[in-house]
């Protein structure tokens, strides 16, 4: 455990960087890096699709740009969905996993990491864009998302997967809900606004 003075400095720094507060809600002591945390398990194997059923897939890992220094935010995803062939945008089935990881450097040089693994409950795609939502299944032990885990909180991520020569891919994160917000609806996420600075995604639209 860290002392009250140090924990207060962590919380103050988190509030100062804005989006970081949305992503982590609060920074609780955790001294391992994102690479040390357990990685999401493989998604369930897809059963053969019925004739005419369309499928979408989104896989990859990326680090997103963040305007505050010493913040490392990464999103890993392996998501899949099936759709009726009549053009409906709502999937008939979605499955897979994704992880949101936020590593923050404190003024004393210590790094803290908050991560959450989520089970996909919706994947929608259209051209170079995709949106996924999922509910928390594992979080940083003792971290700020433990209460959200108890509530099976849903979070969402949006993606713009740029083609060659079409600028950077982008990510948009919903983060955890604020008090009184209620549960995020399936398939919902903010605009993909943060550029990808490392890594990337492979997106297969309905086919």
Image (cartoon, helix red, strand yellow):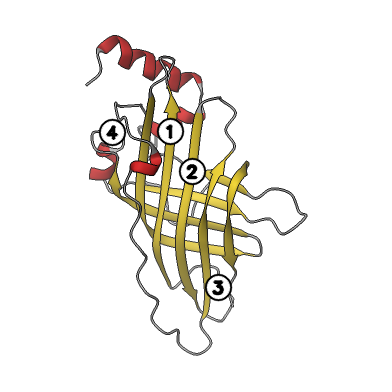
**Horizontal and vertical percent position of residue 45:** 37, 74
Whichever of labels 2 and 1 marks the residue nearer the N terminus, that label is 2
The residue tagged with tag 4: helix, strand or loop? loop
Which residue shows up at 53% across the image and 87% down it? 52
The residue tagged with tag 3: helix, strand or loop? loop
State the separation of the CA atoms marked 3 and 1: 38 Å
Q: Which mark is residue 143?
A: 4
Q: Which mark is residue 74?
A: 2
Cβ–Cβ below 8 Å for labels 2 and 3?
no
State the separation of the CA atoms marked 4 and 3: 39 Å
Q: Is residue 122 above or below residue 173?
A: below
Q: Which mark is residue 88?
A: 3
* Farthest residue, direction bottom: 51
Which residue shows up at 31% across the image and 16% down it? 7
State the separation of the CA atoms marked 2 and 1: 9 Å
Characterize the local packing of mark 3: few (<14), some (14-19) or many (20 or more) Cα atoms within 10 angstroms.
few
Cβ–Cβ below 8 Å for labels 1 and 4?
no
């Amino acid at each position: 455990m860290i002392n009250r003075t140090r924990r207060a400095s962590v919380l103050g720094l988190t509030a100062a960087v804005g989006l970081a507060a949305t992503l982590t809600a609060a920074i609780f002591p955790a001294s391992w890096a994102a690479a040390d945390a357990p990685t999401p398990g493989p998604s369930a194997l897809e059963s053969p699709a019925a004739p005419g059923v369309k499928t979408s897939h989104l896989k990859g890992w990326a680090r997103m740009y963040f305007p505050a220094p010493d913040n490392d935010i990464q999103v890993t995803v392996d998501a899949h969905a099936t759709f009726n062939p009549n053009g409906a945008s709502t999937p008939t089935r979605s499955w897979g996993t994704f992880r949101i990881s936020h590593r923050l450097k404190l003024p004393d040089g210590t790094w803290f990491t908050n991560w959450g693994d989520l089970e996909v409950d919706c994947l929608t795609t259209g051209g170079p864009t995709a949106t996924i939502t999922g509910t928390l299944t594992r979080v940083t032990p003792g971290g700020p998302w433990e209460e959200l885990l108890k509530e099976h909180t849903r979070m969402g991520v949006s993606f713009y997967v740029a083609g060659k020569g079409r600028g950077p891919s982008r990510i948009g994160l919903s983060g955890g809900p604020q008090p009184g917000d209620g549960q995020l609806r399936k398939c919902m996420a903010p605009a993909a606004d943060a550029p990808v600075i490392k890594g990337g995604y492979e997106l297969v639209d309905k086919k």
